[in-house]
Each structure stands twice: as C-alpha cells, then as structure tokens.
Amino acid sequence: MGKRNLLFAFAAGAAAGYLLKHQLDTYQKITPEKALDNAKELFKKSGPINGSWIYMKPEEVNKNGIIYKAYRGGVTRNVDGKNKQYEFYVDTETGGVVDIVETE
C-alpha cells in the first residue's frame, strides 16, 4: 500500500506542477530584464551597442491612439564615430517594442 500512495502522491504533484507552470507562463507579464533583452536584440541587428538601461516600473504610452503599459529604456550606439542614444518602449504584455525615438 505504501508504494501505491507514493506513486499517487508523485503523480498528483507532477500534475499540479504542470498546471501551475502553465498558468504562470500564460498570465505572467514580461520582466523588465526580458524587455531589455528583446530591445537589445532588435538593436544588435543593425550593429553593436555600447550601453543600455531600463526603468523597472511600467508607464502608460499612447501610440497611434492605443494605450500600452510599457517599460521605458534606452541604448547607446556608436554611429559614424559619434555616440547616438535611442529611447524605446517595450510592451509589458507581449515584449514587443512599441516605439523607438532617437534622443540627443
């Protein structure tokens, strides 16, 4: 009887773990670190970057009449011997870059 209970407990724990992971993956918003990684990968397609940063608190951004909750961050790149800074917004739900603006 002991092995049967142990097997049942193991199966119940595995099923609960699977369901919990599925719920977390489905409803968890993207982390600021992952948002920064997504933006950096996008910028790296056009060349190397020198530095990057991101605010940890999401902001509301209005882009084309749609309001997004997004993380604001930036990257610095060396273009033609000059440092250029870009500011970006990454959607907290999808991790997609919503907007990019070159700053001075």
Image (spheres, rainbow, N blue to C red):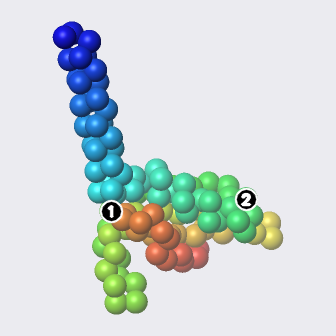
Query: How many numbered callouts?
Result: 2
From this view, report whether residue 37 is shown above or below residue 91: above
The quarter of the image holding the C terminus is: bottom right
Q: Residue at x 39, y 52 (%)?
A: 31
Dot 2 and dot 1 residues touching (CB under 8 Å): no
Q: For the residue marked with disc 2, what is the amino acid?
A: Pro
* Residue 90 image point, x, y percent: 45, 67
Q: Which element is circle 1 on?
A: loop
* Residue 41 image point, x, y percent: 62, 60
From this view, report whether residue 21 is shown above or below residue 79: above
Crowding at dot 1, Cα within 10 Å, few <14 / some 14-19 / many 20+, comes out as: some
Q: What residue does disc 2 label?
A: 48
Kindly indicate the quadrant of the structure image that contains residue 70: bottom left
Q: Which element is circle 2 on?
A: loop
Q: Residue at x 54, y 54 (%)?
A: 37
* Residue 16 image point, x, y percent: 25, 37
From this view, report whether residue 84 is shown above or below residue 27: below
* 40 and 79: which is toward the camera: 40
Q: For the residue marked with disc 1, what is the amino acid?
A: Pro
Q: Residue at x 62, y 65 (%)?
A: 42
Q: What residue does disc 1 label?
A: 58
Q: Earlier in the sequence, mark 2 or mark 1?
A: 2
On the picture, is 44 further left or further right than 98? right
Q: Is residue 56 visible?
A: no
